[in-house]
Amino acid sequence: RGEEDEDSGALGSLHYKVTLKKKRVNLEPDLVLRVAILEAKKIPSRAKYDHADPYFQVSFEQSTHKTQVRFRQTTFDRPAWSETFTFQAFSDRLDSALVVTCMDHQEWAKDQRIGLVAINLLDSADPVSIGDLEERWFMISDAAHPDSQAEVKLQILLRQKPKETDYDSQLRIRVLEA
């Protein structure tokens, strides 16, 4: 409440608009992406043996996580992982692909890639919605083996990051008419 001017006999009207503009102190991610590798099926071996030792690498933005290896899996087995990984995400940069790569562990040589799944979270045909838990099978594709029928079952959750109280805000008052 402002002070009144006693010299002035007539008081006028003041029209104003109040807006609260929050400062973006640091550019912290505002979303959390949670990806669970549940199970896989029809995983072929990339070595000369009749079994694979599969594991998955999950990458988003510049972070990569890796599951445990499931040893001696034939193409008829359905190995299960139930491993969950969490990534930080920005709501204005969800065009980055979530890449899930299936690898075949080799004891005495370089691990071989079985294939991968690249998921665009903003895919217009089937986007991942914030707050919805998606659970479905994805085909693991490999250009070198187009006849592969390998699949992975993923659970994907994209949610808002809990907000901390923001005390670093500005209150702006703009006089529209006086």
Image: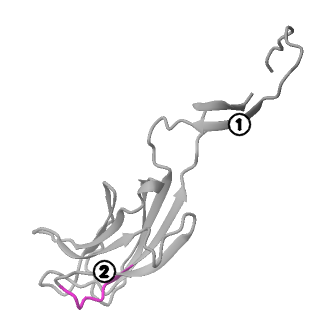
Q: Residue at the location (89% across, 14% down)?
A: 9
- Horizontal side of residue 138 vs 162, given as left or right: left
Helix or strand or loop: what does disc 2 sit on?
loop
When asked about the image quadrant of residue 1, the answer is top right
Among numbered discs 1 and 2, the one appearing first in the sequence: 1
The x and y percentages for residue 130 are 54, 64
Identify the main secondary structure in magenta.
Answer: loop
Residue 127 versus residue 107: which sits nearer the camera? 127
- Horizontal side of residue 10 vs 130, given as left or right: right
Residue type (three-letter) at the residue carrying disc 2: Ile
> Which of label 1 and label 2 is nearer to you?
1
Return the residue found at the far top: 7
Provide the residue designation for mark 2.
140
Q: Residue at the location (45% across, 44% down)?
A: 28
Does the CB distance between marks 1 and 2 fall below 8 Å? Answer: no
The boundaries of the magenta stretch are: 145-152
The x and y percentages for residue 170 are 60, 31
Q: Residues within 10 Å of mark 2 (few under 14, many from 20)?
A: many
Vertical arrangement, residue 30 with respect to residue 159, above or below: above
Residue type (three-letter) at the residue carrying disc 1: Lys
**Residue 17: which numbered mark, if any?**
1
113 in magenta: no
- Cα separation, mark 1 vs mark 2, equals 56 Å
Residue 24 versus residue 12: which sits nearer the camera? 12
Q: Residue at the location (30% across, 89% down)?
A: 149
